């Protein structure tokens, strides 16, 4: 169970068709519309970068390092379960890589 990283920008595009000034997400800080637009653009840039890394055969350890150092997605030191706030468990990294590999 979980969300699709590939579909996340489409979900945000749908949300951005609505009229709002402020959004209160289930995860993350209260944000303005402009902040959601910026987040969506950053997410798309991250997705495109990660796809390039994965499709060029970058090792999983380097993918994890990039996620942690460049995007703050903590993966090392996370317990295998239960899911922990702020942690991207290794099984999620495997699913992330598989989804982006296509």
Image: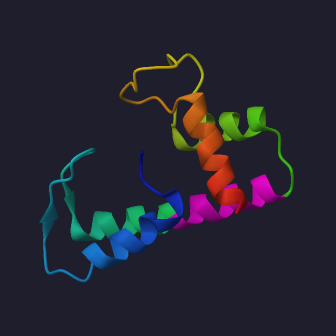
Instruction: Judge left or right: residue 26 versus residue 95.
Output: left
Quarter location, residue 12: bottom left
Q: Residue 102 vs residue 69: left or right?
A: right
> Would you say residue 63 sits in the magenta stretch?
no
Quarter of the image with the C terminus in it: bottom right
Tell me the residue at 61%/35% (across/down): 69
Residue at (27, 45) in percent of width and height? 28
**Residue at left offset 55%, top offset 38%:** 92
Q: In the picture provided, is 44 more to the left or to the right than 69?
A: left
- In reply to whether residue 51 is colored magenta, the answer given is yes
- Number of disc labels: 0
- Residue 41 location, x and y as percent? 47, 69
The magenta segment: 44-55
Percent of width and height locating residue 77: 56, 16
Q: Residue furthest front?
A: 1
Residue under the image location 51 percent in, 37 percent down: 72
Q: Pick the residue in front: 25 or 37.
A: 25
Dominant SS in magenta: helix
Q: Position of residue 14 (x, y in %)?
A: 30, 78
Q: Position of residue 18 (x, y in %)?
A: 18, 80
Task: State the quadrant of the N terminus.
Answer: top left
As displayed, is residue 95 above or below residue 43?
above
Pick the front one: 87 or 38:
87
Comparing 35 with 59, the one in front is 59
């Amino acid at each position: 169970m979980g969300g699709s990283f590939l579909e996340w920008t489409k979900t945000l595009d749908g949300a951005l068709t609505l009229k709002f000034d402020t959004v209160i997400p289930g995860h993350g800080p209260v944000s303005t519309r402009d902040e959601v637009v910026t987040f969506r653009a950053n997410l798309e840039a991250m997705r495109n970068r990660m796809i390039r890394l994965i499709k060029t055969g970058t090792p999983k350890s380097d993918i994890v390092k990039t996620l942690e150092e460049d995007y703050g997605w903590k993966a090392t030191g996370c317990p295998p379960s239960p899911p922990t706030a702020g942690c991207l468990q290794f099984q999620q990294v495997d699913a992330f890589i598989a989804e982006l590999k296509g």
